[in-house]
Structure formats: structure tokens, C-alpha cells
Image (tube, rainbow, N blue to C red):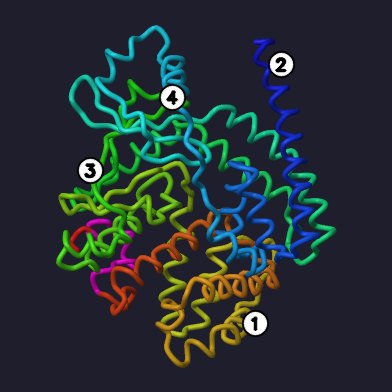
Amino acid sequence: MKNNIWLDGLRSVARVGETAVIAAKAGIKYATEKPSNAKLMRETFESLGSTYIKLGQFIASTPSLFPREYVEEFQGCLDQTPSLPFSYVQGVLASEFAGRNLDEIFTSIDEKPLASASIAQVHAARLVTGEDVVIKVQKPGVETILYTDLNVLHWAAKILEKAVPKVKFASLADIVDEIKTRMVREVDFIEEAQNLDDFVDYLNVTQNTKATAPRVYHQYSTRRILTMQRLYGVPLTDFDVVKKVSKDPSQVLITAMNTWFGSLMMCKSFHADLHAGNLMLLEDGRVGFIDFGIVGQLNPEVWTACIAFMDALQRTDYQAMAKNMLNMGMTDHKVDTQVLAADLERLFGGVLLSDPQELLSSNPADLNDIMMDMVAVGERHGIRFPRDFALLFKQMLYFDRFMRILAPYTDIYADQRLQMVQTLDPNVLLKN
């Protein structure tokens, strides 16, 4: 135990030194090349690794807290890192399954990883019972790096708050706590396994045969190892392949969205990171949901209010929008809904009067601006949105991108097959 504490202490000191060196290089680059603040910050974060990459993704998905230039720049924050040698993977497996012969669990493990991200590396394998699986292996020192980085981040954010006032770090403690909570969860594969089980149970209860998620092999999983069923397919954005597999790519998207909307009401948490790599069209035509490391939690009442807000938005009913905006957020103040409705009309009036659907088909940058403006209106009235509201909105942006690839000439939100408003009744969702 003492040796582990001493080793963690050395790692922390080394990490602080590494952070200082990278920060110094960024300072030199700023002085000599004069890149934009947003671009320099993104490049520096990617050099610093896992914690800062996740912070960059947090910035990209939280337009209510950060300026547009930072939100847009961090949309491309890369979470791919160089792969670790296979010997490391073998060492982790031997350590996690101590006392067990690996040959009695796996008949084969591919040495070349399928993917290598900041927190984990994924390898294809086959169990002795014949099933094809993927093994998610946590990278070394992730938790030590996480806690060290968050301490450094706390002080760096304070400096940035003074040096770059337009970066809204007013809620510094909340932001750091939020990042810490999410990342601690993401490095606990037992929790990810529970998220997967919850989603699979939801699919079974609703008899949804059009979507699936990997089965977890709990007997071969630990806090640092996650062994799951391997799904074969292509990312939903691989349009050429999707067209070959499905006669109607828009139906594939409808199935994915209806399944996800239903999970908001029926699961303990919702998948909050359905980017191109985490949503697949399988060889058998089903939609596969993978990687449940990042999830959000939203009270059913809040989601119901979100749906009602969207419905009111399309009907240009500003009174209903104001009412449901109150139901979405939290406030300690008495809010005059008449005044709030008038503010919302000034915000949305120009877009909605021309075409209510234009708002929902706007590009992600415009939607970021709209969300920032809407949150700003709410703040003026003392309304604070739930933390996971940003994750919900980020996922809506992901769906927007899928629409542009799979259904570029279709107004998905007006499609009768999409049952957003009726997510309280999951049986309605599964008819389409």
C-alpha cells in the first residue's frame, strides 16, 4: 500500500512537470506564431492528453458556458491517442484476472487494437466458448493523471478567468466538479457495464428488435477491463455502405432516434455520446448502440418539458415556451411568464415567423448560438438549467449531423415516423 502511494506521488509530480513543459511550449508558440486563442487551447489540450481532451469535449458540448469560437474549435477535439504495446494489455489482463489462466478465458486476442482513445484501448478477441468479443482495457495511470490534472486545472482556470475575461469561468467550482464526476464514472468500467445492462433491459422490455447493444460478460469484466459482445457493422455516417444495406437510410435514423428518445424515459441514464463511432448499422440491419462510458441523467419531468418546449416552438406559442422553459430549469425567483414570453418572442420571432422548421434544421454553429441566447434569457430571469441539459442538447446536434448525411432532403422532425412527443408511451415508438 505504501509503495502504491509513493508511486502515485511520483506520477503526480511527473505529471505536473509534463504539464508545465507543454504549457511553456504553448506560450512560446503564442508569442512566435500568434494563433487564435481557441486554436492554441485546443492543440495544447490535445497534447496534454486524457483529462484535457475530455475538458475540450466538455467545452464543445456546453455552449451555454463558453464563447462560440471555443465551442466551434473544440468540436474537433481528437480523442485518439497512440496505441500501447500488446505486452501492456497482456499485463493488465494478467493482473486483473490474477490466479486465472488467460488461455482458459480467451482462445485468441488480436494484438492490433481496434481503437485507442485517451482512457482505454480496445482489442478484438474470442472466448473459449466461441463468442466473438471486444476487450476494453484501461490505460496506465489514468486515475492518477485525472486527479492531478483536475487540481492543476482548478488553478489554471483561475488564471484564465483573469487573463481572458470573455471565457465564462464564473461557475468554476461547478465546472470542475462536473468534469470530475463524469471522468471518474468513465474510468469505472463496472458502471459502464451497468449502463449497458440497463439499456439492454429497456430494449427487452419494449420488445425493440430493431436496435441492440453489446452483451456484457461480467465474469470477464472488472473496474479496468470490460469484455463485451462484438457487433459487426459500419458507422451510421458511412453513407455508401448504409445505402447498400438499407433501402431507406432515413428509416435507420428514425429507428435510432426513436430508440434513444424512448430511453430518456425508461432508462436510469441516457447515452450522451452518440457520435459517428458509437452508433452503427449492423450487418443484419439493426442499429447498434455502443460505448456507454458517457451518460447523462435527466428527470422525466424535464424531458417532458423539453418536448413540450419544442412543440410550442414549432407552433410559435411563446406563452407555452415560457411555461415549459420554467419546467426545464430551476429557479428560486418568482418569474413573470409574460415578460419571459416576450423575451423569447424577441429571440425566436425572426426565425419562427419565416419558417418554424428552419430553427430545427439550422447548422450546429447556429444551434449553439441559439442555445447560448436561450440560456442567457433564462439566466436573466433567474432560471438555471440542469447540468445534463447540455448533454441532451449536444446529442441533438449529433442527430442533426446524421440527418445531413442519411436524410439530406427529408425534414426528419416533421416525419410522422418520429414519435418524439409520444416518448411517454414506448409502445408507440416501436410501431415505427
Q: Quadrant of the N terminus?
A: top right
What residue sits right under mark 4 in the picture?
A: 89
SS class of the residue under badge 4? helix
Residue 233 in the image: state x and y as whole percent: 24, 49
Q: Residue at x 64, y 69 (%)?
A: 69
Residue furthest front as drawn: 32
Q: Which of 324 and 171 lies nearest the eye of the viewer?
A: 171
Please state which of residues 236 and 327 is positioned toward the viewer in this rendering.
236
Asked if the residues shown at circle 1 and circle 3 are in contact, with their CB atoms under 8 angstroms apart, the answer is no
Reply above or below: 354 against 386: below
Q: Nearer the viewer, mark 1 or mark 2?
A: 2
Q: Quadrant of residue 256?
A: bottom left
- Marks 3 and 4, the one that precedes in the sequence: 4
At x 18%, y 68%, the residue is: 248
Other residues around mark 3 within 10 Å, as few (<14) / some (14–19) / many (≥20): few
Residue 227 marker: none
